[in-house]
Image: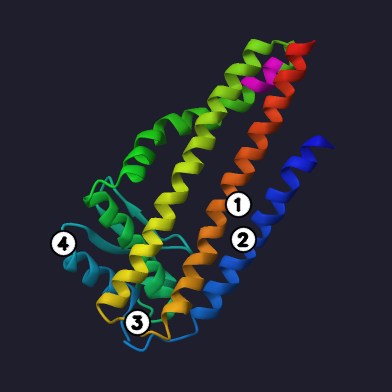
Amino acid sequence: MLYLMLILPALILSMYAQFKVKSTFRRYSNVRASSGATGRDVAVNLLNRNGIGRVHVEPIAGNLTDHYDPQSYTVRLSEAVYGNDSIAAIGVAAHEVGHAIQHGQQYGPLELRHKLVPVTNFASSASFPILLIGLLLQQANLILVGIVLFSAVVLFHLVTLPVEFNASRRAVAQLSDIGVIGNDEVPMVKKVLGAAALTYLAAALSAIANLLYYLLIFMGSADD
């Protein structure tokens, strides 16, 4: 019951966020940008404008699979974004370029997130098995190790929030500056990016809720 009380709000938010991002993207995928620029056009334009022409732009299969790869300096845009001239497409493309700009400027939270990736990958796979073994063997020390590892996962989610919010702010500002979107289109782009931001917020809250539950388990085992 306690676990449900902690995780249920985050679960509901996560389900709502998934619904919101898909419905908002679908809605504004049907609204053509007044400039007629495609996602690829916007990405290339913004990259050149910010002096980071070494970053490539290429299509990638799937839906909402858009991302910036800092290892290969590549902005990858999904099929619905790359060649599409919708409000949703140019908003998402500009957001991913926002990450490339962050990378070029060595934006602190992004640099920290990059350093956390290998730690988080290990912690996310190892924390729960260690917690489970600690519970089965009633070993508080093992439970504590699992909690410390899972804390790295929570930290990663928390660091991700300013990275994503900042990329979205950069996207809106850049699109406005180069005249790709008009004043009446700014709120639409913000809705697309705001819906996407909800998914990151939901993931962070879910991780925090799980961490709190694990801490309560540890305190209970320590009392025993």
Q: State whether the magenta stretch is mostly helix, strand or loop.
A: helix
Dot in front, 2 or 3: 3
Q: Are marks 2 and 1 in contact (CB under 8 Å)?
A: yes
Residue type, mark 3 in image: Ile
Helix, strand or loop at label 1? It is helix
Q: Which range of residues does the magenta coloring cover?
A: 130-134
Q: CA distance from mark 4 to mark 3?
A: 22 Å
Residue type, mark 4 in image: Gly
Say left or right for 178 vs 115: left
Q: Earlier in the sequence, mark 4 or mark 2?
A: 2
Q: CA distance from mark 1 to mark 4?
A: 34 Å
Q: CA distance from mark 2 to mark 1?
A: 7 Å
Query: Can the viewer see residue 11 in this picture?
Result: yes
Residue type, mark 1 in image: Ala
Q: CA distance from mark 3 to mark 1?
A: 29 Å
For label 4, the residue is 53
Q: Earlier in the sequence, mark 1 or mark 4?
A: 4
Image coordinates of residue 82 in percent, x first then y, are 35, 71
For label 3, the residue is 181
Residue type, mark 2 in image: Ala
Q: How is the image coloured?
A: rainbow
Q: CA distance from mark 2 to mark 3?
A: 25 Å
Q: Which residue reaches farthest bottom?
A: 34
For label 1, the residue is 202
Q: Earlier in the sequence, mark 2 or mark 3?
A: 2
Point 61% across, 67% down: residue = 20
Image coordinates of residue 139 in percent, x first then y, are 70, 10
Helix, strand or loop at label 2? It is helix
